[in-house]
Image: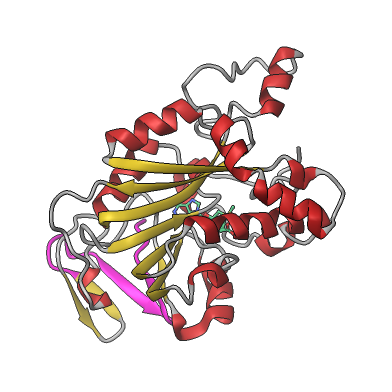
Amino acid sequence: MSSKAAGLPPTFNPQQASRMYDGVEYKDFWDDPAKMRLDKLERAIVRKLLPVSGQRILDLGCGYGRLASCYLERFEQVVMLDGSITLLRQAQETIEERATYIAADANRLPFRPGSFDCVLMIRVFHHINDSQVILSEMQRIISNGGNLIFNYCNKLSVRQLLHWTLRRTRENPLTIKPTGIGTRLISHHPAQIEQLLKQHGFTRTKYLGAGILDKLPADTERFSSLAEALTPLFGAIKLAPWINCRATLSSEGQIKTSQRLDDILVCPACHQELTRQAFTYYCRGCEASFPIENGILDFRIG
Ligand SMILES: C[S@@+](CC[C@H](N)C(=O)[O-])C[C@H]1O[C@@H](n2cnc3c(N)ncnc32)[C@H](O)[C@@H]1O
């Protein structure tokens, strides 16, 4: 499959993985009938998995804000974060001042512990090389009892199983280790995801599967409803190419999210306090500085 067809950036520098979508016209990926069906289904899934209301949500790897309509009305505060400045600018154009915009690497987040009651991370996990690091960050920034809603590319999908059985690939989908580490597309085994979530304190989980029926050409309302109705089944048997998950962080302890958005920001490099002077944040620990440019807080390092 070409990188355009898969919605992946054409070139990739592993040293700057968080910026891989800079300059990519990601909107174009969704501009074909099959992708529109998948988009519709994904929105329905995200709406189903998101809590009906909350204080503060982080859309991590928000892209151009494709999913914003699913949560804008449900949360008091909305933070859109991405490694790509060009995609953040597009998000800004559509969502405007309803959200706060942050450029940062998902592996080095500029937030205090317990900053969010919900993190949404759709079509991002397959770009993250170290799933331990990202899940540790999720455990750190989500408040107790808060939710992580994310999806992952399933290495155990029917398609992968067929390819392997027909010897079109040597990658054994039954083994638990992820495939594609160091590339643009990493696939995970459902058992590894469950293990990782448990290790990082996420207890209750709900899974919905997508990417099977929406690939077929029929585009009737009834067919869309059927694809949506079958997501719990595809989530339970874990053979769909995309598995969407809501995982809830254990509610023990007392970490509460702070009301003011400025209060949750810390240095992404050393997690020390920041001071703000005009359009720059300065770290009181390592003395790094982070500019605010045209409404985007730029916490990227390097
Ligand atoms: C496939 S797009 C998905 C965008 C959006 N979540 C959606 O579903 O439409 C992946 C997004 O994740 C962002 N991304 C990938 N790796 C990242 C990282 N390490 N830190 C921050 N953003 C990252 C990309 O810039 C891109 O916007």
- Residue furthest to the right in view is 218
291 is within the stretch colored magenta: yes
Residue drawn at point x = 61 percent, y = 18 percent: 171
Point out the image quarter for the C terminus.
bottom left
> What percent of the width, then of the height, locates residue 10?
67, 48
> What percent of the width, then of the height, locates residue 239?
62, 30
How is the model colour-coded? secondary structure
Q: How many marks?
A: 0
- Relative to 131, is 77 above or below? below
Q: Is residue 56 left or right of residue 120?
A: left
- Relative to 86, is 216 above or below? above
Q: Which residues are magenta?
A: 283-302
Residue drawn at point x = 51 percent, y = 17 percent: 175
- Asked if residue 71 shows in the view, the reply is yes
Residue drawn at point x = 16 percent, y = 59 percent: 255
Q: Is residue 188 left or right of residue 41?
A: left
